[in-house]
Image: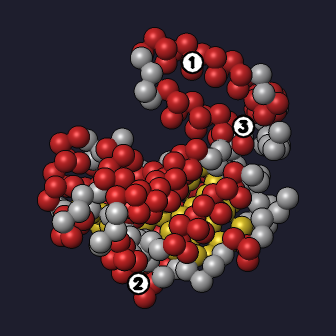
């Protein structure tokens, strides 16, 4: 079923879908509010991620409008909780946590396209993505300490991505990193020239989307599932996953096409 762009979009969040449905491009569209995360944004993220997972999408790209990724949570919205009870905080917080979990859980590869600033909750969205592409003028940071807070929820994807001591320093000092520094510590997959950012991003998306959808979904599942296993269990699990993938129609198509020196005809199977 084709995805309905209008149904998935709202006043703060826009969704575009490629003609074949293989690529979903989502944009946090609050440039006048530094693309901060509010209820509309989290609603849009949930809806578009769910729709992508129920469709033929292979790649999900997230970016911010007007060359700025995301400055984190909307403090004006959060200020309503200043005198809230512990339960009210618990009720408010799961939404962004569930978004980060979905980004890793859906079959499609999630790509964060980071330009400009990436702060706080924006760091959570970026580091929860499978691949992070940054413009060379992008910057990353967790400034929560300025409000007497700590990046509790976003710490989970951040610390699964960066070196421990650098992550601790960044979160406790609010230190900002440029794109090259973020790449050095493992937070960023690839740094693109800001002037050619869109072209280089499109090249990457084209390369990813021209892969076997079965390989994408099973490879992603295997990667995240094996991380917390003991070494011997990793080997057993990955051997089983390899066997299942090797028996798939996509692998048969890929091997036959390779031997015949033809492009494979990947299908959603």
Going 60% across and 61% down the picture, which residue do you hit?
A: 46
How many dots with numbers? Answer: 3
Q: Depth check: 37 or 1 in front? A: 37
Going 66% across and 39% down the picture, which residue do you hit?
A: 217
- Say what secondary structure mark 3 lies in: helix
Which residue is identified by label 1?
237
The CA span between labels 2 and 3 is 39 Å
Residue 140 location (% of width, % of height): 30, 63
Which residue is identified by label 2?
33
Residue 158 location (% of width, % of height): 34, 49
Q: Depth check: 158 or 196 in front? A: 158
Q: Residues within 10 Å of mark 1 (few under 14, many from 20)?
A: some
Q: Quadrant of residue 80?
A: bottom left
Q: Which circle, 1 or 2, is nearer the viewer? A: 2
Going 85% across and 59% down the picture, which residue do you hit?
A: 1
Q: Is residue 193 above or below residue 258?
A: below
- Say what secondary structure mark 2 lies in: helix
Q: Residues within 10 Å of mark 3 (few under 14, many from 20)?
A: many
The mark nearer the N terminus, 1 or 3, is 3
The CA span between labels 1 and 2 is 45 Å
- Say what secondary structure mark 1 lies in: helix
Which residue is identified by label 3?
214
């Amino acid at each position: 079923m084709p995805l309905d762009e209008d149904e998935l979009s709202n006043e703060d969040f826009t969704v575009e879908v490629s003609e074949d449905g293989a690529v979903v491009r989502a944009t946090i569209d609050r440039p006048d509010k530094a693309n901060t995360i509010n209820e509309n944004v989290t609603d849009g993220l949930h809806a578009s991620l769910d729709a992508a997972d129920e469709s033929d999408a292979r790649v999900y790209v997230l970016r911010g409008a007007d060359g700025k990724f995301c400055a984190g949570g909307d403090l004006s919205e959060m200020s309503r909780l200043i005198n809230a009870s512990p339960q009210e905080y618990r009720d408010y917080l799961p939404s962004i946590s569930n978004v980060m979990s979905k980004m890793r859980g859906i079959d499609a590869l999630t790509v964060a396209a980071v330009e400009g600033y990436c702060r706080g909750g924006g760091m959570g969205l970026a580091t929860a993505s499978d691949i992070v592409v940054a413009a060379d003028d992008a910057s990353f940071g967790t400034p929560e300490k300025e409000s007497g807070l700590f990046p509790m929820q976003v710490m989970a994807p951040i610390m699964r991505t960066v070196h421990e001591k650098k992550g601790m320093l960044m979160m406790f000092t609010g230190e900002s990193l440029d794109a090259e520094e973020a790449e050095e510590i493992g937070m960023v997959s690839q740094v693109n020239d800001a002037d050619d950012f869109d072209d280089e991003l499109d090249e990457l998306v084209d390369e990813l989307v021209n892969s076997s959808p079965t390989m994408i979904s099973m490879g992603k599942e295997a990667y995240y599932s094996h991380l917390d296993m003991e070494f011997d269990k990793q080997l057993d699990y990955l051997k089983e996953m390899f066997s299942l993938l090797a028996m798939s129609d996509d692998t048969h198509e890929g091997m036959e096409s390779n031997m015949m020196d033809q492009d494979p005809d990947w299908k959603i199977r």
